[in-house]
Amino acid sequence: MSRNGYMRAARIFAERAQQEFAKARLEMDDAGLRQAAEKGWGAAFQATKALVAKKGRKPSKGTTRLKETLLDLEKRDPALSRAKVFERFATFLGELHVNCFGEGDYSVKIIGRILDKLPDYIRTIESL
């Protein structure tokens, strides 16, 4: 997939995450909340892969390798460090993918706050 393809996917996932979260929150639907979180994670993952591609590296499929790549890129480009890309990515991974979707251990308030941070993360990625 191209860098633009990753960003397009990120925006679609982010929009769907917000839509599903809004509906699931009203209904207090556990499965819907967890699916919204996973779509939010998908948005962060795709945006991060776009950044890696933009920086001339091949995006990895796994999260550990992707985090390692982000750390390497931070050494070469201090703007990534200033934007806290690694930390933000790790938060999306931990809270949305692992805690909420995977373990079912979540707070609606926290998931809502993290999902609200996705558009800014995507804009940041686009600007780097």
Image: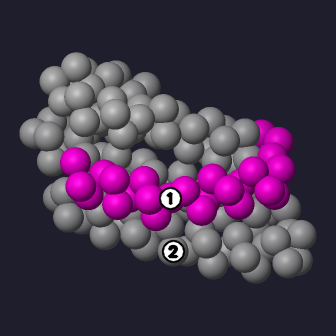
Residue that carries the numbered disc 2 in the rendered image = 15
Q: Is residue 83 magenta?
A: no
Q: Is residue 56 left or right of residue 68?
A: left
Question: Residue visible at 59% across and 68% down?
Answer: 17
Q: x%, y% of residue 127?
A: 24, 55
- The quarter holding residue 77 reads top left
Q: Is residue 77 left or right of residue 105?
A: left
Highlighted magenta segment, given as a residue range: 103-128
- Give the main secondary structure of the magenta stretch: helix
Q: Quadrant of residue 105?
A: top right
Q: Is residue 109 magenta?
A: yes
Residue 44 at what x, y percent from top left? 45, 51
In the picture, which quadrant includes the N terminus? bottom left
The reply to whether discs 1 and 2 touch (Cβ–Cβ < 8 Å) is: no
* Left or right for 82, reference 28: left
Residue 63: tell me if it is visible: no
Q: Is residue 76 visible?
A: yes
Find disc 1 in the rendering and name its residue: 118
Q: Residue at x 22, y 20 (%)?
A: 75
The residue under the point 86% across, 69% down is 29
Residue 87 vs 41, above or below: the answer is above
Amino acid tagged 1: Leu
Q: Which tag, 1 or 2, sits closer to the chain's start?
A: 2
| Neighbours of disc 1 within 10 Å: few (<14), some (14-19), many (20+) | many
Residue at the limit of the structure toward the right, as seen here: 28
Task: Point out the frontmost of discs 1 and 2.
Answer: 1
Circle 1 — which element? helix
Q: Position of residue 21 (x, y in %)?
A: 70, 70
Residue located 10% across and 39% down the image: 56
Q: Amino acid at mark 2?
A: Glu
Q: CA distance from mark 1 to mark 2?
A: 9 Å
Residue 113, image x, y percentages: 68, 56
